Amino acid sequence: MASTLEENNPHSQAPKPNFMVKLKENLIFKSKWAELNGAMGDLGTYIPIVLALTLASHLNLGTTLIFTGVYNFVTGAIYGVPMPVQPMKSIAAVAISNPEFGIPEVMAAGICTAGILFILGVTGLMQIVYRLIPISVVRGIQLAQGLSFAMTAVKYIRNVQDFAKSKSGGQRDWVGLDGLLLALICAVFIVIVNGAGDDGDRVDNQESETRTGQKVQKIIFSLPSAFLIFLLGVVLAIIRGPNAIKGFKFGPSRIEVMSISKHAWKQGFIKGTIPQLPLSVLNSVIAVCKLSTDLFPEREVTATSVSMTVGLMNLIGCWFGAMPCCHGAGGLAGQYKFGGRSGGCVALLGVAKLVLGLVLGSSMVKVLTQFPVGVLGVLLLFAGIELAMCARDMNTKDEAFVVLVCTSVSLVGSSAALGFLCGIVVHLLLKMRNMGSNGQSCSDVLWFHRNP
């Protein structure tokens, strides 16, 4: 009788899935090799910046590996998508270029940025900002960031890099364990295996091919290209610096609570937080949410939750000397490009970082300094191209115009905030210009866009 009443009750609802069950589902691999391959897609950004901060500013690499490993695992379980964990690039750039901006200032900048992002998330203001920003401006920021990654990648491939001083040296030799020829071979290999990122479905539609040819193609297209290239880089790093292995010290680095002076708080906020905050809001939250919606429409990734996770990561980790981190559209695009389709992708990467941090600690830096930079450049190049390709859905001339203005200003002015501001102004001007012809009201111009 009770069950009959429940069935007839229009207000009865199906029981919601258990929270722990949902977390487990988020970590299930869609394809083991593809997820493993996707986990390598963000290393072209992660390794150079972490290495530069370790060499130039004495960042505790072991602590950073442990905390970023935990971040990766937790965010993978929460979101169920390959949500990346990347360095806060603007803060890192200041630390690398300015010797007086030390680790206490870096951590102060990370904590201040995190606090603001967390408040914006908790109050719901970040979601309001996300819903109001025009899609053409978001695409402009994504295109600018993608092209910036690609141009940096080309520098890594063509020129010798000194990460400790954040400078490019002379042209890279053609032949060698970190030669230009090696980087070009890796790039060709990725193009053959991954193509333009169409998931390898093209084989099934080629009726003219023989069954044997199809089998060969399927094998080639299913190879974990990024993982194989990263594995090659590790082998070459060991060959280039065999003494690095002898210098391994087993066990985690010592984790200590940071002591931050008033001067460090002031310098961290002025020189680190102020330039980092616009980049974090636009690329680490707004662009990430939009890209996640494009790639995984069945998953709900809100600006509120992303802003809060970025905030919580650094409000905890920076007090112990872990590198300030955020999410990033470039990392998400890179991991998706190489096959990442679930939270298990980044969770796997997180476990690897955690193990390395606990077993080898900061002694890992000796191997990373020998890692072929040209190979990292290749991984970063394809991640940047994947992110830039998001702008291909702009169908009208007005949208394309806003995208290109936003992108041009962002790249030339080296400021996402300036590009964003110019994009908003141009968008509003175009709306006002067309207001009379298409019957739009003034309120339609001001409330110009709603993101889903």
Image (cartoon, grey):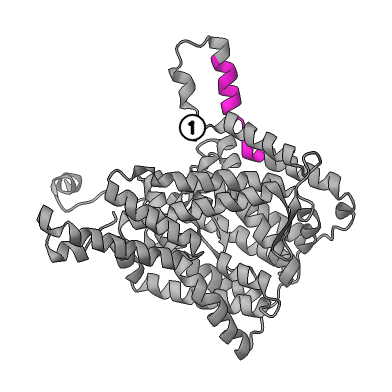
Q: Is residue 215 magenta?
A: yes
Prevailing secondary structure of the magenta residues: helix
Of the residues shown, which amino acid type is indicated by label 1? Answer: Asp
Q: How many marks?
A: 1
In the image, 265: left or right of 371? Answer: left
Q: Quadrant of the N terminus?
A: top left
| Outermost residue toward the bottom in this view | 262
- Frontmost residue, 360 versus 385: 385
Q: Is residue 445 magenta?
A: no
Q: Is residue 120 visible?
A: yes
The stretch of residues the image draws in magenta is 214-227
Please report the residue visible at 38 percent of the width from the left and 62 percent of the height from the top.
Answer: 303
Q: Quadrant of the C terminus?
A: bottom left
Q: Which residue is mark 1?
A: 199
Q: Residue 329 appears at what percent x and percent y? A: 48, 54
Q: Residue 130 appears at what percent x and percent y? A: 33, 62
Q: Residues within 10 Å of mark 1 (few under 14, many from 20)?
A: some
Please report the residue visible at 69 percent of the width from the left and 34 percent of the height from the top.
Answer: 185
Q: Is residue 278 above or below residue 291?
A: below
Q: Residue 137 appears at what percent x and percent y? A: 35, 57
In the image, 125: left or right of 12? Answer: right
- Frontmost residue, 408 versus 295: 408
In the image, 423: left or right of 156? Answer: left
